[in-house]
Amino acid sequence: MKSLFKATLLATTMAMALNTPLVSAATTSAEQGAAAKADKSAAKFKDDDQQAAYALGASLGRYMDNSLKEQEKLGIKLDKAQLIAGVQDAFADKSKLSDQEIEETLKGFETRVKTAAQAKMEKDAKENEDKGTAYRTAFAKEKGVKTTKSGLMYLVEKAGSGEAPKDTDTVVVNYKGTLIDGTEFDNSYTRGEPLSFRLDGVIPGWTEGLKHIKKGGKIKLVIPPDLAYGKTGVPGIPANSTLVFDVELLDIKPAPKNDDKAADAKADNASAAASK
């Protein structure tokens, strides 16, 4: 039983190193639960406990198979037959390794996975940086594109009317966000709900970029990594990603006067500190 626990620990370790959820297989199994229950008679399980045991084994097996495929992406190829043999031997209490050997082996494996994952992240980050630079260089040559001192690039498609938003204003927008290869990671249009936020509460590329249009305006923003999510990235957006946003500014809601005064005081204090 201890060995079975070690196998589960291995799965958890692999999931943590790869930042993949252990429940993914169980979730898939749950989604198929209704169909499995309807087909219970065809499966010929003796009772609910027998079916539950099989489901647990199938869920664990599916998860481990997916994990092995993730290891291969890191250049680590584990022997599936040996994994199955380890599980069988654990149930038969005939493990070829002592508890200490299992623990030491798993610690070594965890180190290997983390090292390989880190190397892959660094490689991917460098590739993203190079591809982003090339994309921005090409975009800069398009008609109407402007580049600010910060490196932000934008193309005003519709100027809008009225005043441009200030940092303390709340803006309401519709937008689509993609990576440079066209992969979409966010879209308020498909959600059917615009996004509302204070302008200085988002990534720097948005805070700066939306000031170039007014209410009713539309703009394309090409944001370099240091004005977006930088070297770390976030789920769905890899490290060092250049981001492309198509944004429509629907409304601008000025901040209460007290907020404006507080922001001005904060800016004055920062300026005074910098001059000392």
Image: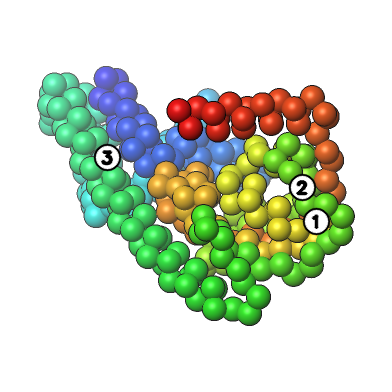
Distance of label 2 from label 3 (alpha carbons): 45 Å
Q: Quadrant of the N terminus?
A: top left
**Looking at the image, is mark 1 or mark 3 earlier in the sequence?**
3
**Looking at the image, is mark 2 or mark 3 earlier in the sequence?**
3
Tell me, for residue 165, which label it has, or none: 2
Tell me, for residue 114, which label it has, or none: 3
Residue at 42% over, 44% down: 232
Distance of label 1 from label 3 (alpha carbons): 47 Å
Q: Quadrant of the C terminus?
A: top left
**Figure quadrant of residue 127:** bottom left
Q: Amino acid at mark 2?
A: Pro
**Depicted 54 relative to depicted 175: above or below:** above
Q: Amino acid at mark 1?
A: Lys
Q: Mark 1 — residue?
A: 214
**Depicted 160 relative to depicted 17: above or below:** below
Position of 20 with respect to 29 (left or right) is left
Specify whether residue 60 is in view. yes
Q: Residue furthest right?
A: 162
Q: Residues at badges 2 and 1 in contact (C-beta under 8 Å)? A: yes
Residue at 41% over, 39% down: 19
